Amino acid sequence: RCISPMYVKDKSYETTYSWAKCIGTLYFSGLARANGDYRWVSVSPGATAGTNLLNDLGLVQRLMFKMLAPIMKLFGMAHDTDAGAGRYLAVVYDTESKYDNGVFYGSKDGKLTGDLVDQTPIFEDLGMTSYQDNAVKAVENFF
């Protein structure tokens, strides 16, 4: 679940990064409901090898992921930055209204690459309007 448990004891980089992405996704979904004249869609680039994301990890984790990335790409478990960026472009230049307003799109359940699908059936908390409203309030109070 995206939101539960409320208080997380794990303060690792991976956990805080995941929470930030979750809150951002809920925030944009809330904005989409409140501002239907604008298009707010969240997109995961998938497992994208070749980004600077690993730079913030510890040395052992960085080395492990740098060695695994080519193997993951070979088996279709990761893709390059062009494919990751292509996911964003597919949504931005969506002329067929394939991607709905306020929805988070990412890989199919259990996959790290491939077609974009609505993540709400996978992470039901993303569709909870009360969570979205709380994320909007939290972000707007922060700024």
Image (cartoon, rainbow, N blue to C red):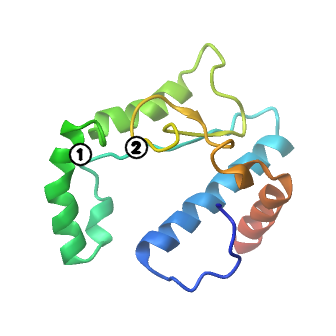
Q: Which residue is mark 1?
A: 72
* Up/down of 91 relative to 1, above or below: above
Please name the residue shown 51% across and 37% down the image: 108
Q: Is residue 104 left or right of residue 135?
A: left
Residue ID at (18%, 37%): 74
The tag on residue 119 is none
Q: Amino acid at mark 1?
A: Met
Question: How many numbered markers are drawn?
Answer: 2
Residue shown at the point (47%, 44%) measured from the top left: 110
Give the spatial CA distance, label 2 vs label 1: 10 Å
Mark 1 neighbour density, 10 Å: few (under 14) some (14–19) many (20 or more): some
Residue 92 occupies quadrant: top right
**Quadrant of the frame with the N terminus:** bottom right
Q: Secondary structure at mark 1?
A: helix
Label 2 element class? loop
Q: Mark 2 or mark 1: which comes first in sequence?
A: 1
Give how far across and how far down residue 87 sits, in percent. 45, 32
- The answer to whether marks 2 and 1 mark residues whose Cβ atoms lie closer than 8 Å is yes
Estimate the x, y position of residue 120 in percent, counting from the top left: 68, 43
- x%, y% of residue 70? 16, 46
Residue 124 or 23: which is nearer the viewer? 124
Does residue 55 appear left or right of residue 31 in this picture?
Answer: left
Location of mark 2 (residue): 112
x then y, percent, for residue 106 = 52, 40
Q: Which residue appears at 40% of the width and 43% of the height?
A: 112
Q: Amino acid at mark 2?
A: Leu
